[in-house]
Image (cartoon, rainbow, N blue to C red):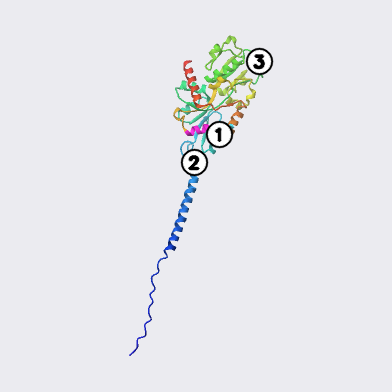
Amino acid sequence: MSSIPPTTPTVVQPPQRPKTGKIVAIIAAIVVVVVAGVLIFVNVTKQSNTADAADGAITSGLGSPDEPVRIGVVGASDPYWAELTDAAAADGVSIDLIDFAEYSQPNPALSEGELDLNQFQHIVYLAQYNTSASDTLVPVGSTAIYPLGLYSDKYDSVEDIPDGETIAIPNDPSNLSRSLLVLQSVGLVTLNGGGTIYSTLNDIDADNSRIQVTTLEPSLTATSLPDVAAAIINNDFVEPAGLSAEDAIAQDDPADETALPYVNVWAATEENKDNDVLLRVVDIYQNTQSVLDGVVEQSGDTAVILKTPVAQLEESLATVEADTLANE
């Protein structure tokens, strides 16, 4: 009989219990890393958005690169316009300057939606345009008052101009009247009733005036100098004619308290007068020193920079429009 060898007892190991504490710790660490990553991403995104908001860059709509603010001017080559364009770009606003050769063009272009703003005229000019065209363009900011000067390439002073000579002045109604007032202030003409901002050639008292007056399109008075004794030349056309404001032999006083109607303004359509982007452009112009310095330099140091409240500009425009209609 064979013997059965003794059986070696089988040792059964108890099941391993999960190391719960260690797993939880790992999961917690993962969660912390993920949450930290999310927080960092959110914070970076928030900071980026905040920086964009602080920068104020316009990425769509009016003022964006795809839809720049279109500004109508006369004399876009004047250096201060480049200063304005650069300053606006630095502030996140894109500008497109539209240059016009004649004063008669920017207002219709603004009214017809070809422009968003224009900047070339004073209140009297704007009032006379509105009344004649039955339009409602409005001032949305002031720029400066520019003196209106009398120039000559033949005579060094008003006193040197012989009696009976001819002087050329701009033919647009507002500058025509202002030119006559300049000529009267230096004794070249006498105006019936003392003259007003509505005076015309018919108001010249021929018996008591020293010279004859002829009218030309504003851009042509400078080129007429070889053919006349002297000419009233609008500020925009002085430098292109090879002249400087110091060459004027007479001019009006831009600091006179009665000069408000001759403050140059930014103009917009009535429906856009409260547009934030357009007002932002005006603000950039009025508060960028390099732009203002350029305006003064371009004028031969004669421009008087003003920040006239818009309400005051609107009041002056309404008054001049009413007076214009009454004088028609």
The residue drawn where x is 45% and y is 60% is 25
The secondary structure that dominates the magenta segment is helix
Q: Which label sits on residue 84?
A: 1
**Residue 285 colored magenta?**
yes
Quadrant in which residue 264 is drawn: top right
Q: What crowding class fits label 3: few (fewer than 14 Cα within 10 Å), some (14-19), or many (20 or more)?
A: few
The residue drawn where x is 53% and y is 20% is 174
Residue 218: percent from left, percent from top: 55, 22
Query: Identity of the amino acid at label 3?
Result: Glu
Q: How far apart in space, not on screen, are marks 2 and 3 (Cα)?
A: 61 Å
Going from the N terminus, do you reach mark 2 or mark 3 first?
Answer: 2
283 is higher (above) or lower (below) than 255: below
Q: Nearer the viewer, residue 210 or 122?
A: 122
Q: Which label sits on residue 327?
A: none
Residue 309: percent from left, percent from top: 51, 27
25 is higher (above) or lower (below) than 294: below
Task: Check if mark 1's residue and mark 3's residue have beta carbons within 8 Å.
Answer: no
For the N terminus, give its image quadrant: bottom left
- Helix, strand or loop at label 3? It is helix
Front of the two marks 2 and 1: 2
Task: Check if mark 2's residue and mark 3's residue have beta carbons within 8 Å.
Answer: no
Q: How far apart in space, not on screen, are marks 2 and 1 (Cα)?
A: 22 Å
Magenta-highlighted residues: 276-288
Going from the N terminus, do you reach mark 2 or mark 1 first?
Answer: 2
Which residue is tagged 3? 159
Which residue is tagged 2? 53
Query: Identity of the amino acid at label 1?
Result: Leu
Residue 206: percent from left, percent from top: 57, 10
In the picture, measured across the screen, residue 150 lies left or right of residue 8, that is right
Front of the two marks 2 and 3: 2
Front of the two marks 1 and 3: 1
